[in-house]
Amino acid sequence: MAGSWTLADARGVLRSPTAADDKYSRGVVGFRTGSDAYPGAAVLGVEAAWRAGIGMVRYLGPDRAAQLVLARRPETVTADGRVQAWVIGSGMVPTAPPDADDASPGDSGRVGPTAARSAADTAALRGILSGAQPVIVDAGALDLAVGAHAPRIVTPHAREHARLRELLGLDPASAEDDDGRAAVAAQTAAALGATVVVKGAVTIVAQPDGWATRVTAGTPWLATAGTGDVLAGALGAVVAAAEARREAQGEAHGLGALAATAVWLHGRAATLAAGGLGAAGGPITALDVADALPLAVAEAIAAE
Ligand SMILES: NC(=O)C1=CN([C@@H]2O[C@H](COP(=O)(O)OP(=O)(O)OC[C@H]3O[C@@H](n4cnc5c(N)ncnc54)[C@H](OP(=O)(O)O)[C@@H]3O)[C@@H](O)[C@H]2O)[C@@H](O)CC1
Ligand SMILES: Nc1ncnc2c1ncn2[C@@H]1O[C@H](COP(=O)(O)OP(=O)(O)O)[C@@H](O)[C@H]1O
């Protein structure tokens, strides 16, 4: 049975910056996220990465999403360059239909901008996934994680996990109870050769070597659109910061421990945001969760 990730575990992974640090030594995270249909996912992920305490964020996505990212966070660098970790796929959809470059009607019959990956997007994402830097693979890039070689953390919700398992030739059915979900996630991780984060009220983190843990979100108010995009950004920040420390000092943590720490911060941030509205909590938005990440980080590193 997988144990639970706690404040003490998160504290063991996170570090305060020192006087010897600069923006690069604190880590650089790159984003290839968002689409004309879902530019907000790009904004949410970038915001979360900044708020989780990274040295620099690079955003390389569609023009409209880039403008919105810059409007929210002018600190963001939109030029290509070296990064220690990537976040890809949030705000994209996995497969491009034949008319991917055309707007197509949704359920309402209205014609809107497409979220489907273009061939150029797919090639860029495949390039990132064939590199050496760790990659957080979310939403519309999950299919590309199969057969890739970069160190990967994939972040499916339950339906995306079932689709991923189908791509891997595994039974898409999961389990109701958390022990069963952990066993299924471990099987996915082994087949994929990547760390798997199966999101939910209890999020399962499983490495391909069989290591697994679970992280319980402190509040169901977290179940709201865009909080998964915030999680992907927090993951990118935690992994890039750790990778920068590994390059400089040789301090190494498994991707599972880094992922569980980011999931813990995300859940704690939601609890702090919802709890600020009264003892029973209250409605929060994805940006509220990102805004509360600094408090969660400060709490975790307080007793380093
Ligand atoms: N602000 C932004 O930019 C945001 C952007 N976002 C981006 O959106 C993209 C798609 O992510 P997603 O998780 O919504 O889609 P997806 O995994 O395909 O699951 C869809 C499946 O759900 C179901 N379903 C549909 N309607 C339902 C309903 N009313 N109530 C219950 N179930 C319902 C339906 O399945 P069915 O039940 O019909 O089998 C359908 O197949 C992704 O790139 C993400 O990053 C989001 O993060 C939000 C904020
Ligand atoms: N009932 C719940 N209680 C607490 N957290 C939840 C619950 N349901 C989902 N979550 C969390 O909310 C987030 C939703 O992510 P995701 O499904 O990717 O949404 P989106 O694509 O809209 O960003 C995940 O971090 C997940 O763990």
Image (cartoon, rainbow, N blue to C red):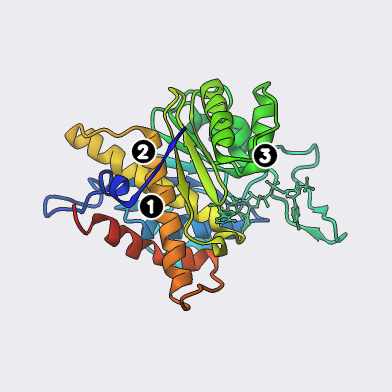
Q: Please, is residue 194 above or below residue 75 in the view? A: above
For the residue marked with disc 3, what is the amino acid?
A: Pro
Could one spot residue 215 in this view of the protein?
yes
Residue at 58% over, 36% down: 181
Query: Disc number at residue 257?
Result: 2
Q: Earlier in the sequence, mark 3 or mark 2?
A: 3
* Near-viewer residue (194 or 280): 280
Q: Please, is residue 181 above or below residue 303 in the view? A: above
* Near-viewer residue (210 or 41): 210
* Near-viewer residue (266 or 51): 266
SS of the residue under disc 3: loop
Mark 3 → mark 2, Cα distance in angstroms: 27 Å
Residue at 54% over, 53% down: 229
Residue occupied by mark 1 = 57
> Residue 168: where, in percent of width, then height?
64, 23
Q: Which of marks 1 and 2 is nearer the N terminus?
A: 1
Asked whether the beta carbons under mark 1 and mark 3 sit within 8 Å of each other, the answer is: no
Mark 1 → mark 3, Cα distance in angstroms: 24 Å
CB of residue at label 1: within 8 Å of ligand 1? no
Q: Earlier in the sequence, mark 1 or mark 3?
A: 1
> Residue 93: where, in percent of width, then height?
67, 44
For the residue marked with disc 2, what is the amino acid?
A: Ala
The answer to which image quadrant residue 292 occupies is: bottom left
Q: Please, is residue 267 above or below residue 255 in the view? A: below
Query: Disc number at residue 94?
Result: 3
